Amino acid sequence: MTDIATTLTSTPKRLAGRRAATFGLLAVLAGILLVPIGLNDEFVYHIFITICIFAALSTAWNIVGGYAGQLSLGHAVFYGIGGYAGVMLANLGISPWFGMFAGAGVAVIVAIIVSYPCFRLHGPFFALATIAFLEVFRVLALHFKEFTGGATGMMISLNIGWEWMVFRERLPALVIAFGMMLVCLAAAWVIRNRRLGFYLVATRERESAAKAAGVNTVKVRLMAVSVSAALSAMLGTFHAMYLTFIEPEAMFSLEFSIQIAMFALIGGIGTIWGPLLGAVLLVPITEFARGALGAEAIGLHGFVYGIVLMLVVLFMPNGIMGLLSRLRPAESARKETEAAPVAAEPRASGRTDAGEAVMRVEGLNKHFGGLHVTNDVGFTLREGEILGLIGPNGAGKTTLFNMLSGFLKPDEGSVSVRDAVGDWQHPASPGEFAALGVGRTFQIVQPFAAMTVEENIMVGAFHRHAQVGDAREAARETARRMGLGPYLDLEASSLTIGGLKRLEVARVMAMEPRILLLDEVMAGINQTDVRRAVDLMLSIRDTGVSIIAIEHVMQAVMSLSDRVIVLNSGQIIAEGEPRSVVSDPMVIEAYLGKEFANA
């Protein structure tokens, strides 16, 4: 009752905070449009047009750099492609309104070519590839001067009017820039609040956990970079028409790319509104400095960015949006009550009502160089059975789990899973295992720390529910069953270790798995949480879910397991009922040594 009351009383505070934030953002947007109109000054118009362009470009960059966590340091390549496509087609008599879509199409193709091989690897490859392609396109623009004007640049045909995006007054340009900024913000908002956005953030936070939840991490990143590239190219077309002149050094500039990323970093990377706030803060400072100092201010914008970035890193590591979120009233995690430890008795025998086989493991062998990690491992898991997997450290248990979930391919042997219609399948990747109803946790807990408890569970729920509303409802129901209902709005990082382990189980259970692989979910938690975890696993088993559990907590193994397998040095040395297995001399020797086995 206390938890429910606390949740209910905190709801009006959250709603009031959200309303205040909404009104504040609407005021910022209204100011961007109305202030220059009210002042009616050409220079002020230029500043606010520049704010719109940079805010839009930074928002587009943030879709891949913030949401997906893929640092693009050469993002101006897409901007430059759009600029040149729009100007070249405009000079041929084709409206830039059409030219911007042609540039966007080319930019998407380039983005996929650059990104696909990089997203299959780990490390800084994407950042380096974008810089490399930026330089390639700059050199190409310099070389093919008959099309691009080369180093001397290219003037646009001065056809005045909306059809050509060229105006004598500044107001129409502001309206277009403001509209394009709204389109980028709307795209960022829609992506973040749909399944794609949840998947992108999950992939950024914990790629392996996202794969285990059935996320095709390469595909979702490609979708993000495609949208980002298309928006950047369209903005490049408009900006080129606004400037009426383009040249390779400006359109394919590394410095310009870093500026785009800088606005998102200062405003709040990975947030919807951070890039906008970063542009609103920085653009007026640099533009007014340039206007006031003229030629004496060459390079001053770089100094300003450096100072602001240093201050942000020192005092606002999460950007302006991070500071604003800290100013709002925050809920704190409620401490879980301790209870006296509950001793568990060994189960007298395995279950006799377990169903037919749902997983077959046959002759699994895995080598890492000269190390033989698993050696001819084979067993069968039945429907509604809890199979305990125990063994000393280094026995190969986690390696076996990685092969049972598609994260490692065995050198020899196979893993077969029976699908919903009864046919045996041979999945090969984490996504294929997840599609067949195999869910897993990890030895080192892997929450999506930047997400709330509810959002963490929703990532799993999206595996069965494509719509956000359905996934949210499923996540809330799963959280209630897992004892996480009162903590839905808390960030995952605020939970205790026991709470984090329950959260990971909840995320997997939201996938509605048929087979659950639990990797030491009771390690490092107190006796109360162990008892809760045991009861939770038994309740999951009673719904018909088959469980394979790696555990070192013998209390839990004896309480849970219908059958136990003992792994030592990559080999199965014992298998059977819990009571008989723990008294096996080979098992005692593996854990304690020969002197205890012979005692």
Image (cartoon, rainbow, N blue to C red):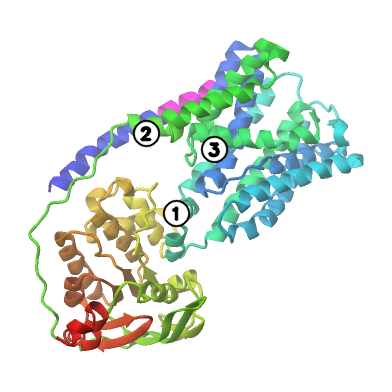
Residue 583, quarter of the rendered image: bottom left
Q: Which mark is residue 185?
A: 3
Q: Provide the secondary structure element on which disc 3 rests.
A: helix
Estimate how packed mark 3 is, as few (under 14), some (14 to 19) or many (20 or more) residues with alpha carbons within 10 Å.
many
**Residue at label 1?**
202
Of 3 and 258, nearer the camera is: 258
- What is the spatial separation of the Cα atoms under label 3 and label 2, in whole angstroms? 19 Å
Quadrant into which the C terminus falls: bottom left
Residue labelled with disc 2: 325
Mark found first going from the N terminus, 1 or 2: 1
Query: Spatial distance from mark 1 to mark 3, Cα to Cα?
Result: 21 Å
The kind of residue on which mark 2 rests is Ser
**x, y (%) of residue 103?**
74, 45
At x 9% / y 62%, what residue is drawn? 341
Mark 1: few, some, or many residues within 10 Å (few <14, many ≥20)?
many
> Which residue is at a point 52% across and 44% down the rendered structure image?
66
Which of pointers 3 and 2 indicates the residue nearer the eye? 2
